Amino acid sequence: MILAASLATLTTVVASPASAAVPGLTIVSNTSANNPTSPKPITATCPPGKSVLGSGAQITGGGGDVVIDDLVPSANTVFVTAYENHAGFAANWSVTAYAICANPLPGLTIVSNTSANNPTSPKPITATCPAGTRPVGSGAAVSNAFGEVAIDQLRPDAFGVTARGVENHAGFAANWKITAYAVCAVALPGQTIVSATTVANPGSPKGITAACPGGTVVVGSGARIQVVGGVGSGDVGIDSLRLPTPASVRANAVENHAGVAANWSNTAYAICATP
């Protein structure tokens, strides 16, 4: 059963002057029902006349056995789907989609790139922005893995966005693929990418906040999980990628029921610009 209805919508408007570099900047969120149903799709929609810059998602509950399967930016929406893995999760859980919206920016476009469709794991893939533009937002989508593949990397750089999907310890014999999305635009005043990384140890969960430099705000986000030696990397995934304030990104990562014995770390990325 697929639950399409939502229970709550929250919009926060970030005030900007008339000559703002990112005019009309607004963060919109939408949260699914809180129950054991899987999968759960949910969409956050920008106000009329505004376009998507960045995206985010948050699983509440789930205990590490619910993964973000889709985090897809489009012209004016962000679509998120979360799946339980093979272990399932009997208790209630919910998923929230976040859309960072603004008036359309110069050169604004969304590009994507999709991996091969096969059983190989891991699968990294990069979406590269057109010449003359830089990434302002990111996204990723796993196809046909039904909760058995974790997105462990959604990493922006100066040229585009790299996403990576990794099978969990159970493996997945069928074909699957991952798509990386980059929301691109002409470089904004003050645009920079900042990151913050947790300590590397076997502890779970791991949350970390990347804060924009003074006078700038978040326009996009990302995260990256790194497991020493790579063993068990599919057993820890990005559990949430949210904006606790207009100038920060909070990334949370959680091990599933199998756990990860090796040391691992979690990195949050914030794409920042002058408001």
Image (cartoon, rainbow, N blue to C red):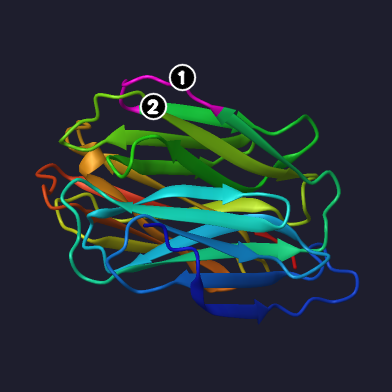
Mark 1 vs mark 2: in front: 1
Pointer 1 with pointer 2, Cβ within 8 A: yes
Q: Which residue is mark 2?
A: 123
Query: Residue 115 lies in magenta, yes or no?
Result: yes
Q: Could you say where residue 131 lies in the image, as x and y percent from the top left?
A: 78, 29
- Residue at the extreme right: 19
Q: Quadrant of residue 170?
A: top left
Query: Residue 35 lies in magenta, yes or no?
Result: no
> Considering only vertical position in the picture, is 232 above or below 120?
below
Type of residue at label 1?
Ala
Q: Could you say where residue 195 lies in the image, as x and y percent from the top left?
A: 47, 53
184 or 2, which lies in front? 2
What residue is shown at x 31% (from left), y 21% (from top)? 119
Asked whether the viewer can see residue 6, the reply is yes
Q: CA distance from mark 1 to mark 2?
A: 8 Å
What residue is shown at x 22% (from left), y 38% (from top)? 168
Q: Quadrant of residue 245?
A: bottom right
Q: Could you say where residue 174 lies in the image, as x and y percent from the top left?
A: 30, 24
Type of residue at label 2?
Lys
Quadrant in which the N terminus is drawn: bottom left
Asked whether the viewer can see residue 271, the reply is no
Instruction: Give the numbered dot on residue 53.
Output: none
Identify the secondary structure beneath mark 1.
loop
Q: Is residue 61 left or right of residue 138?
A: left
Identify the secondary structure beneath mark 2.
strand
Q: Which residue is mark 1?
A: 116
Per the rendered image, the range of residues in magenta is 114-122
